[in-house]
Image (spheres, rainbow, N blue to C red):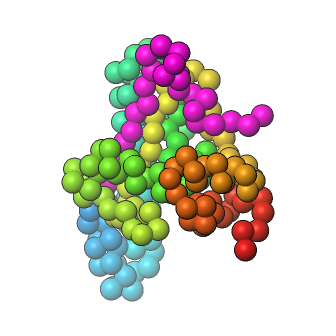
Amino acid sequence: MNRSLADFIAPKESGLADYIGTFAVTVGHGVEEFAKSFEESNDDYNAIMAKALGDRLAEAFAECLHHRVRREWGYGRDENLTNDELIHEKYRGIRPAAGYPACPDHTEKQLLWELLEVEKHTGIKLTESCAMWPASSVSGLYFAHPEARYFAVGRIGEDQVADYAGRKGMDKGVAERWLAPNLDYDPA
Protein backbone atom coordinates (compact mmCIF):
# COMPACT_ATOMS: atom_id res chain seq x y z
CA MET A 1 0.00 0.00 0.00
CA ASN A 2 1.29 3.46 -0.90
CA ARG A 3 0.41 6.06 1.71
CA SER A 4 0.38 9.82 1.59
CA LEU A 5 -0.27 12.42 4.27
CA ALA A 6 -2.99 13.66 1.91
CA ASP A 7 -4.88 10.43 2.73
CA PHE A 8 -5.57 11.93 6.16
CA ILE A 9 -7.28 15.17 5.13
CA ALA A 10 -10.60 15.52 3.33
CA PRO A 11 -10.25 16.84 -0.23
CA LYS A 12 -11.74 20.28 -0.85
CA GLU A 13 -14.20 18.76 -3.35
CA SER A 14 -15.67 16.50 -0.65
CA GLY A 15 -17.42 19.44 1.00
CA LEU A 16 -16.36 18.12 4.42
CA ALA A 17 -14.92 20.52 6.96
CA ASP A 18 -11.47 19.23 7.85
CA TYR A 19 -8.32 20.79 9.24
CA ILE A 20 -4.57 20.42 9.46
CA GLY A 21 -2.76 22.11 12.32
CA THR A 22 0.77 23.45 12.19
CA PHE A 23 3.24 24.21 14.94
CA ALA A 24 6.79 25.27 15.71
CA VAL A 25 8.10 25.29 19.28
CA THR A 26 11.45 25.81 20.94
CA VAL A 27 13.08 25.79 24.32
CA GLY A 28 16.48 26.21 22.70
CA HIS A 29 17.21 29.86 23.36
CA GLY A 30 20.11 29.67 25.79
CA VAL A 31 20.62 25.89 25.66
CA GLU A 32 23.73 26.12 23.45
CA GLU A 33 25.30 28.76 25.71
CA PHE A 34 24.47 26.66 28.78
CA ALA A 35 26.04 23.57 27.18
CA LYS A 36 29.06 25.62 26.07
CA SER A 37 29.69 26.68 29.67
CA PHE A 38 30.17 23.00 30.52
CA GLU A 39 32.34 22.40 27.45
CA GLU A 40 34.61 25.28 28.46
CA SER A 41 35.06 23.55 31.82
CA ASN A 42 35.89 20.27 30.02
CA ASP A 43 32.66 18.78 31.39
CA ASP A 44 31.50 16.92 28.29
CA TYR A 45 28.98 14.81 30.19
CA ASN A 46 26.97 17.79 31.45
CA ALA A 47 27.29 19.53 28.06
CA ILE A 48 25.72 16.49 26.40
CA MET A 49 23.06 16.27 29.11
CA ALA A 50 22.17 19.97 28.73
CA LYS A 51 21.63 19.52 24.98
CA ALA A 52 19.66 16.30 25.50
CA LEU A 53 17.48 17.96 28.13
CA GLY A 54 16.79 20.87 25.77
CA ASP A 55 15.76 18.44 23.02
CA ARG A 56 13.50 16.46 25.38
CA LEU A 57 11.84 19.65 26.66
CA ALA A 58 11.15 20.80 23.09
CA GLU A 59 9.60 17.42 22.31
CA ALA A 60 7.53 17.59 25.51
CA PHE A 61 6.34 21.08 24.51
CA ALA A 62 5.23 19.73 21.11
CA GLU A 63 3.44 16.81 22.81
CA CYS A 64 1.73 19.19 25.25
CA LEU A 65 0.46 21.30 22.35
CA HIS A 66 -0.72 18.17 20.53
CA HIS A 67 -2.68 17.17 23.64
CA ARG A 68 -4.24 20.64 23.71
CA VAL A 69 -5.16 20.43 20.02
CA ARG A 70 -6.79 17.02 20.51
CA ARG A 71 -8.93 18.43 23.34
CA GLU A 72 -9.79 21.76 21.72
CA TRP A 73 -10.61 20.22 18.35
CA GLY A 74 -12.83 17.78 20.23
CA TYR A 75 -11.44 14.45 19.07
CA GLY A 76 -9.44 13.83 22.24
CA ARG A 77 -11.68 15.55 24.74
CA ASP A 78 -12.33 12.35 26.69
CA GLU A 79 -8.75 11.05 26.60
CA ASN A 80 -7.41 9.73 29.87
CA LEU A 81 -4.15 8.14 28.78
CA THR A 82 -1.44 6.66 30.95
CA ASN A 83 2.16 7.76 30.47
CA ASP A 84 2.85 4.46 28.71
CA GLU A 85 -0.05 5.04 26.31
CA LEU A 86 1.22 8.56 25.59
CA ILE A 87 4.74 7.27 24.96
CA HIS A 88 3.37 4.66 22.56
CA GLU A 89 1.13 7.28 20.88
CA LYS A 90 -2.14 5.46 21.59
CA TYR A 91 -4.10 8.64 20.95
CA ARG A 92 -5.97 9.64 17.81
CA GLY A 93 -4.03 11.66 15.26
CA ILE A 94 -0.40 12.17 14.30
CA ARG A 95 2.09 15.05 14.19
CA PRO A 96 4.53 14.32 11.36
CA ALA A 97 7.36 16.68 10.54
CA ALA A 98 9.18 17.71 7.39
CA GLY A 99 12.44 15.83 7.03
CA TYR A 100 11.09 12.69 8.70
CA PRO A 101 9.95 9.42 7.08
CA ALA A 102 6.36 10.45 6.16
CA CYS A 103 7.54 13.78 4.68
CA PRO A 104 11.23 13.48 3.75
CA ASP A 105 11.54 16.86 1.99
CA HIS A 106 13.02 19.31 4.50
CA THR A 107 12.06 22.26 2.26
CA GLU A 108 8.45 21.86 3.36
CA LYS A 109 9.56 23.64 6.54
CA GLN A 110 9.99 26.81 4.46
CA LEU A 111 6.23 26.93 3.79
CA LEU A 112 5.50 26.34 7.47
CA TRP A 113 7.88 29.19 8.40
CA GLU A 114 6.09 31.47 5.96
CA LEU A 115 2.56 30.50 7.07
CA LEU A 116 3.24 30.83 10.79
CA GLU A 117 5.86 33.59 10.58
CA VAL A 118 7.90 31.27 12.77
CA GLU A 119 11.06 33.35 12.96
CA LYS A 120 9.13 36.50 13.88
CA HIS A 121 7.08 34.81 16.61
CA THR A 122 9.57 32.31 18.06
CA GLY A 123 13.04 33.29 16.91
CA ILE A 124 13.52 29.83 15.36
CA LYS A 125 15.52 30.15 12.14
CA LEU A 126 16.05 27.73 9.28
CA THR A 127 19.59 27.15 8.10
CA GLU A 128 20.32 26.78 4.38
CA SER A 129 19.93 23.01 4.87
CA CYS A 130 16.55 23.61 6.57
CA ALA A 131 17.81 22.57 9.99
CA MET A 132 16.14 24.47 12.82
CA TRP A 133 18.17 26.81 15.00
CA PRO A 134 18.24 26.79 17.95
CA ALA A 135 18.59 23.03 17.87
CA SER A 136 16.13 22.34 20.69
CA SER A 137 13.16 23.09 18.42
CA VAL A 138 10.37 20.99 16.93
CA SER A 139 7.94 21.74 14.10
CA GLY A 140 5.34 19.81 12.18
CA LEU A 141 1.71 19.21 11.34
CA TYR A 142 -1.30 17.94 13.27
CA PHE A 143 -3.64 15.45 11.58
CA ALA A 144 -6.86 14.45 13.36
CA HIS A 145 -8.06 11.68 11.03
CA PRO A 146 -9.01 8.58 13.06
CA GLU A 147 -6.97 6.32 10.76
CA ALA A 148 -3.90 8.57 10.61
CA ARG A 149 -0.76 6.55 11.30
CA TYR A 150 2.93 7.21 10.88
CA PHE A 151 4.55 5.64 7.83
CA ALA A 152 7.71 5.98 5.80
CA VAL A 153 7.81 7.14 2.20
CA GLY A 154 9.58 4.36 0.35
CA ARG A 155 11.84 4.50 -2.65
CA ILE A 156 10.89 7.21 -5.15
CA GLY A 157 11.12 6.70 -8.91
CA GLU A 158 12.37 9.32 -11.36
CA ASP A 159 8.86 9.87 -12.75
CA GLN A 160 7.58 10.55 -9.22
CA VAL A 161 10.37 13.05 -8.52
CA ALA A 162 9.69 14.84 -11.81
CA ASP A 163 5.97 15.04 -10.97
CA TYR A 164 6.67 16.23 -7.42
CA ALA A 165 9.17 18.86 -8.57
CA GLY A 166 6.70 20.12 -11.19
CA ARG A 167 3.85 20.45 -8.69
CA LYS A 168 6.16 22.15 -6.21
CA GLY A 169 7.62 24.51 -8.83
CA MET A 170 11.09 23.19 -8.05
CA ASP A 171 13.87 22.22 -10.42
CA LYS A 172 14.04 18.41 -10.70
CA GLY A 173 17.75 18.42 -9.79
CA VAL A 174 17.03 20.41 -6.63
CA ALA A 175 14.23 17.99 -5.70
CA GLU A 176 16.61 15.08 -6.25
CA ARG A 177 19.12 16.67 -3.88
CA TRP A 178 16.55 17.06 -1.10
CA LEU A 179 15.07 13.60 -1.65
CA ALA A 180 18.38 11.79 -2.27
CA PRO A 181 18.02 9.20 0.53
CA ASN A 182 14.70 8.06 -0.96
CA LEU A 183 15.66 7.93 -4.64
CA ASP A 184 15.24 4.61 -6.42
CA TYR A 185 17.69 5.66 -9.13
CA ASP A 186 21.04 7.37 -9.57
CA PRO A 187 20.43 10.96 -10.68
CA ALA A 188 24.02 11.35 -11.95
**Where residue 101 appears, x then y in whole percent?**
62, 49
> Residue 176 in magenta?
no
| Residue lying at the far left of the rendered structure | 120
**Where residue 98 appears, x then y in whole percent?**
51, 50
Magenta stretch, residue numbers? 1-27
Quarter residue 37 falls in: bottom left
Quarter residue 178 falls in: bottom right
186 relative to 142, above or below: below
136 relative to 114, above or below: below
- Which quarter of the image is occupied by the C terminus? bottom right
5 relative to 163, above or below: above
**Where residue 164 appears, x then y in whole percent?**
61, 49
Give the residue drawn at x 78%, y 34%.
1
Q: Is residue 55 visible?
A: yes
**Where residue 169 appears, x then y in whole percent?**
50, 53
Give the residue drawn at x 68%, y 36%.
3
Give the residue drawn at x 73%, y 52%.
159
171 relative to 70, above or below: below
Give the residue drawn at x 55%, y 62%.
171
Q: Nearer the viewer, residue 158 or 155?
A: 158
Q: Is residue 25 visible?
A: no
Q: Nearer the viewer, residue 168 or 185?
A: 168
Q: Across the whole image, how many numbered discs are drawn on residues?
A: 0
In the picture, measured across the screen, residue 146 lies left or right of residue 73, that is right
In the picture, measured across the screen, residue 160 lies left or right of residue 143, that is right
In the picture, measured across the screen, residue 134 lies left or right of residue 75, that is left
